[in-house]
Image (cartoon, rainbow, N blue to C red):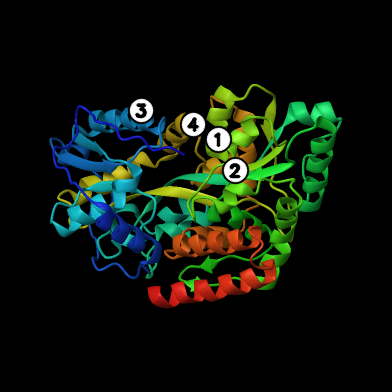
């Protein structure tokens, strides 16, 4: 996914030039910061009792990164908020790669914004605005159970609002399946998916049967379906035997040439997408996620659809997502809490995610489904799969040590692909590596 820096007419004039060393430090913190209890106690008036006239004339600063189409949806919601409360929201947009270092520099320099959009909360533990008094004890109940673990600190206090989700899942080339005379089932096991993909490969003459992104996040989908996870909260939790069983079908496909091999060996542990393989019709099945829907709708010159995730011991995908947070050192805590609540109502979240092709985090939207303007049926396959995704997958994804564990995962899996290790040994080594990450973080 690309994140584009945008200069806006209401851009704050404060800026920071952060070099490679600072970025590396921030990346380490984001991957390994264990979080912990929040030092401030928050406090303020309940938003539901807020008199808009008491906020009139105030200004709120919002530090934001964009995935693309979400920017206009955000601007539209901000305009509604400004009109309703007679306030000004200064939207400052920075590249995704800079959000953590920029925020940390602002916080350490005593220039905290009121609110921000972040991919992880752990780097800011102790600085986040506690929202319980503003939003009420029952506010968490408005959100799907899985995302709640990412919204609270070690003491169970609300310090973030899950604003949107991504979900991993497979895409299939329906033209190739039809050409091969192979029917796409409504549900399938991993064994069935592999078998059918190979049948299409042979009948349609494609280079591969199956492709997936080079990503610890995508590999974690397979682990989850096999009943194990790299981490749970701040602890290592990998079952090497279960991981070996879950990953063996993918390893077999890579070894026999029915799934791409080379890109697992290139660029170290950096992410690499296999979307071009799918767009070139070189593989009839591709495991990626909902963010591909819009680009495939625009660029695929063939029929395609999404399907439910394959099952092993369980089903579902593996989630990701973003949060909106406030900062206790920000100048307008009451306005910040009011803004956070407004941006994450049912109506606001539906407007934001439908414009951006994201998944909902609110329980009501997850249950009812959402009407998307682009490929609605395919997008709702991902939403339906959220219900099949175990809560442990969310706990793994939102862990402050997940990123570091995922990097170790890619490293060890690449050793298997290169023929340097057997899968079982690599999973034992991975377990030891994650144990070390957890110990250092602790």
Whichever of labels 1 and 3 marks the residue nearer the N terminus, that label is 3
Q: Nearer the viewer, residue 216 or 401?
A: 216
- CA distance for labels 1 and 3: 19 Å
In percent of width and height, residue 399 lies at: 46, 63
Q: Which tag is nearer the camera, tag 4 or tag 1?
A: 1
Q: At 61% from the left edge and 58% from the top edge, which residue is drawn?
A: 390
Tag 3 near tag 4, CB within 8 Å: no
The residue positioned 77% from the left and 29% from the top of the image is: 176
**Circle 2 sits on which residue?**
288
**Res 48 seen here:** no
Depth-wise, is mark 3 or mark 4 nearer the camera?
A: 3
Q: Is residue 216 visible?
A: yes
Query: Above or below — where is 348 with respect to 9?
Result: below
Q: Locate residue 313, reporting x and y percent.
A: 74, 61
Q: Is residue 390 left or right of residue 121?
A: right
In the image, residue 226 above or below residue 380 = below
**Which mark, residue 354?**
4
Residue that badge 3 annotates: 72
CA gap, disc 1 and disc 2: 7 Å
Instruction: Determine the secondary structure under disc 1.
Output: helix
The answer for how far apart the CA atoms under marks 3 and 4 are is 12 Å
Q: CA distance from mark 2 to mark 4?
A: 19 Å
Discs 1, 2 touching: Cβ within 8 Å: yes
Rendering coords of residue 375 (x, y %): 60, 27
Residue that numbered label 1 is attached to = 292
For this rendering, which residue is in front, 98 or 356?
Answer: 98
Of callouts 4 and 1, which one flags the residue occurring earlier in the amino acid sequence? 1
């Amino acid at each position: 996914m690309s994140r584009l820096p945008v200069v806006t007419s209401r851009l704050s004039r404060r800026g920071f030039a952060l070099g490679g060393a600072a970025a590396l430090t921030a990346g380490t913190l984001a991957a390994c910061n264990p979080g912990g209890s929040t030092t401030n106690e928050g406090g303020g008036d309940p938003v539901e009792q807020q008199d808009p006239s008491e906020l009139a004339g105030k200004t709120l600063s919002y530090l934001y990164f964009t995935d693309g189409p979400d920017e206009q949806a955000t601007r539209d919601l901000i305009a509604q908020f400004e009109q309703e409360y007679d306030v000004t929201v200064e939207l400052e947009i920075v590249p995704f790669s800079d959000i953590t270092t920029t925020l940390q520099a602002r916080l350490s320099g005593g220039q905290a914004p009121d609110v921000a959009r972040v991919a992880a909360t752990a780097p800011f533990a102790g600085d986040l605005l506690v929202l319980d008094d503003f939003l009420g004890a029952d506010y968490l109940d408005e959100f799907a159970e899985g995302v709640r673990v990412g919204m609270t600190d070690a003491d169970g206090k609300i310090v973030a609002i899950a604003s949107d989700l991504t979900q991993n899942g497979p895409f299939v080339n329906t033209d190739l399946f039809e050409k091969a005379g192979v029917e796409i089932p409504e549900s399938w096991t991993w064994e069935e998916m592999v078998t059918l993909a190979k049948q299409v490969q042979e009948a349609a003459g494609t280079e591969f049967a199956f492709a997936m992104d080079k990503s610890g996040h995508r590999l974690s989908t397979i682990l989850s379906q096999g009943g194990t996870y790299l981490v749970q909260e701040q602890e290592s939790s990998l079952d090497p035997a279960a991981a070996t069983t879950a990953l063996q079908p993918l390893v077999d496909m890579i070894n026999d040439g029915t799934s791409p091999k080379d890109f697992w060996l290139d660029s170290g542990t950096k992410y690499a997408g296999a979307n071009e393989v799918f767009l070139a019709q070189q593989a009839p099945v591709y495991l990626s996620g909902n963010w591909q829907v819009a680009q495939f709708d625009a660029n695929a010159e063939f029929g395609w659809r999404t399907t439910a995730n394959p099952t092993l011991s369980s089903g579902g995908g593996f989630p990701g997502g973003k949060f909106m947070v406030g900062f206790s050192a920000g100048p307008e805590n009451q306005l910040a809490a009011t803004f956070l609540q407004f941006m994450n109502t049912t109506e606001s979240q539906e407007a934001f995610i439908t414009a951006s092709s994201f998944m909902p985090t609110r329980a009501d939207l997850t249950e009812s489904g959402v009407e998307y303007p682009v490929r609605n049926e395919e997008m709702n396959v991902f939403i339906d799969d959220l219900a099949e995704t175990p809560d442990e997958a969310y706990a793994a994804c939102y862990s402050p040590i997940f990123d570091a564990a995922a990097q170790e995962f890619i490293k060890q899996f690449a050793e298997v692909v290169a023929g340097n290790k057997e899968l079982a040994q690599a999973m034992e080594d991975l377990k030891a590596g994650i144990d070390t990450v957890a110990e250092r973080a602790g």
